[in-house]
Amino acid sequence: MKEILEKVKDVAREAGAEIMKFYGEDNEISKKKDKTLVTEVDLLSEKIILEGLKEFNYGFLSEEKLGSAGRAESERVWVIDPIDGTMDFIKETGEFSVMIGLVENGKPILGVVYQPTKDKLYSAVIGGGSFLEEKGEIKKLEVSKIDDYSQACVFGGRKYIKGLEAKLCNDLGISDFLNHGSAGLKVGLIAEQKADLYISSIDKTGEWDICAGDIILREAGGKTTDMNGNDFIYNKKQYLNLDGFVASNGILHEKVIEEIKKIRG
């Protein structure tokens, strides 16, 4: 797994370097069937990743090309988001990432999240811990020990927090919010102890939005589930997260799930 991880890191960095060649340029933007945006750079990044990983001969599930033939029956499958945070790439916030996860029989066993604007790379393999590589240094990651919701920091997204998330924060007494792009980077920041909780109640995200971050957060001591508290099974035929997701430092998780269930009735 360590050898595979090093290859995945190289591929993520290669894709990131190519993305940066187009960062700040006037890139062609189009809308997909689900009305989300895609650029020519998303497609280029995906091509680099798939080409770089083809030697392993695993199946793949990727945001742009969706899936390889027979991937739902494959034992090992790459789950890829070529640019997680396309809007942040377009708006030049710097808060976007390349995400590559590897699942085996539906469970994540490896993950890499790479932020090319900061040359910041999160990685994990199952049973091997979670790490951050930044500015030439490698740091082992461990989530916060915060168990008091009044001291917890939650991601509010770029739009003002509302709906279920707003009610949940109000009911639990959470008042510290952090805005940041890219689902993968948000989860990485929880692993870094820079935040404690991330909730998404929408049903439009895909497995590629959480797979790589899931194993990184778990190996740092945190937890990722759907809003019913169920662990994610990856490489499903239905690849959307229809029941949202919750990512946390683990300590806060059970109470959050309980409150969500109350709110949803």
Image (cartoon, rainbow, N blue to C red):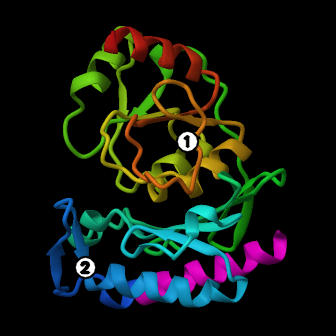
Magenta stretch contains residue 30: no
Above or below for 195 versus 66 = above
Task: Where is residue 237? Give x, y as percent.
Answer: 48, 55
Label 1 element class: helix
Between disc 2 and disc 1, whose residue precedes?
A: 2
Amino acid, disc 1: Ile
Q: Residue at x 24, y 32 (%)?
A: 161
Query: Which span of residues is magenta-colored?
Result: 1-18
Residue under circle 2? 39
Q: Residue at x 74, y 72 (%)?
A: 5
Could you say which disc has been placed on residue 53 in the image?
none
Residue under circle 1? 190
In the rendered image, which quarter is residue 2 located in? bottom right
Above or below for 194 versus 2 = above
Mark 2 → mark 1, Cα distance in angstroms: 28 Å
Could you say which is closer to the camera, residue 158 or residue 237?
237
Above or below for 119 versus 255 = below
